[in-house]
Amino acid sequence: MPEAPGSKARPADADARREPSSGALQAARLAATFSVAARDPVSGTLGIGVASHSFAVGSRVPWAEPGTGVIATQAFVAVGEPGSRALALLREGLGAARVLEHLLAADPAPALRQIAVIDPDGGVAVHTGARCIGAASHRARDGFCVQGNTLPSETVLDAMAAAYEASRGDLAERLLGALEAGESVGGDLRGRRSAALLVVPGAAGSAGGSRLVDLRVDDHGDPHAELVRLLRIRRAGERFEAAFQSIASGEFDAARAHFADAQKRHPENAEYSFWAGVSLANAGYVEEGIAWLRQAFAAHPCWRELIARLPSAGLLAEDARLSEWIRHGAR
């Protein structure tokens, strides 16, 4: 049976009575891994973070849909993916526990599976099959759960749960913190090669798109550090998009702050300086725009060539000072 929040013991071996056949093993893909899934109680956002020694763990473990729920399918993952089936059941209004019961009842080899389900209300249900490679277990708590197999010990799960419970703020950051805590005490027994982070809105049709964060590191010597770097870049991109929205609404001080924040978060990307300059120049702040553009030009000559092509595309305002500057090589 699914485990209720607050429990930590491995489930009884009822599923072991259905012996997995060789066919069941052949029809499954090993996803030895550890993961954390959660619903943020403040924003309602749903998310999952996962790490593994396996290649591209993000392609088969995490599932999430706005306003529907989040699922982790790991250990020996059935071909046909119970993740899509779980999302369909959640859409019908079933809670996490009922969804997991349906999945296990229809599974010919539940002893091989490790499945976690969180519904849009924060209901949690987790199953760790008796035949998952040890150490294998989970911790189900109020609004979140951690689960793993092929671990050096269950200390990995305890560390993850403690780190998540102690953290506050942005859900993506909290998920990363839990993964880091698990990694710090051993993580995957085999080492580390891939990781993924997926966060979706708590309500369908929310502003910002269907996936607030969707990052994968398929193969890397330090996948967690790379995931942290990618999230930093993602946050820079969010600030960049916010700057354009502020420009469109005439809030130029807010736009300046967003452009500066984007550049601070990802200083290696001269694109932020370039389009900040173009946007401010087009809004009539020509000298300020030129100052931003010079930063981009100092990074690479391609931006100087690109600025000369924008007027014919209708993307740069007709301004005598700006036109003269471009004609003289945008120095």
Image (cartoon, grey):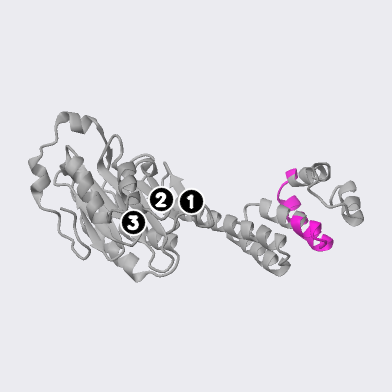
User: Badge 1: few (under 14), some or many (20 or more) residues near its Cα, within 10 Å?
Assistant: some
Q: Say if 178 sits above or below 136 in the image.
A: below
- Tell me the residue at 36%/43% (across/down): 57
The kind of residue tagged 3 is Ala
Q: Say if 55 sits above or below 153 in the image.
A: above
Residue identifier under label 2: 65
Residue 185: x and y in percent read 28, 58
> How much space separates mark 3 and mark 1, taking CA atoms?
17 Å
The kind of residue tagged 1 is Ser
Residue 263: x and y in percent read 64, 59
Which is more toward the observer, 285 or 195? Answer: 285
The disc, 2 or 3, on the residue closer to the chain's N-terminal end is: 3
Which is more toward the observer, 258 or 70? Answer: 70
Which is more toward the observer, 131 or 127? Answer: 127
> How much space separates mark 2 and mark 1, taking CA atoms?
7 Å
> How much space separates mark 2 and mark 3, taking CA atoms?
13 Å
- Tell me the residue at 28%/61% (across/down): 123
The disc, 2 or 1, on the residue closer to the chain's N-terminal end is: 2
Which is more toward the observer, 74 or 225? Answer: 74
Q: Which residues are magenta?
A: 279-302
- Please identify the quarter of the rendering in which residue 279 is found: bottom right
Residue identifier under label 1: 210
Residue identifier under label 3: 37
The disc, 3 or 1, on the residue closer to the chain's N-terminal end is: 3
Q: Say if 277 sits above or below 78 in the image.
A: below
Is 111 magenta? The answer is: no
Is 300 magenta? The answer is: yes
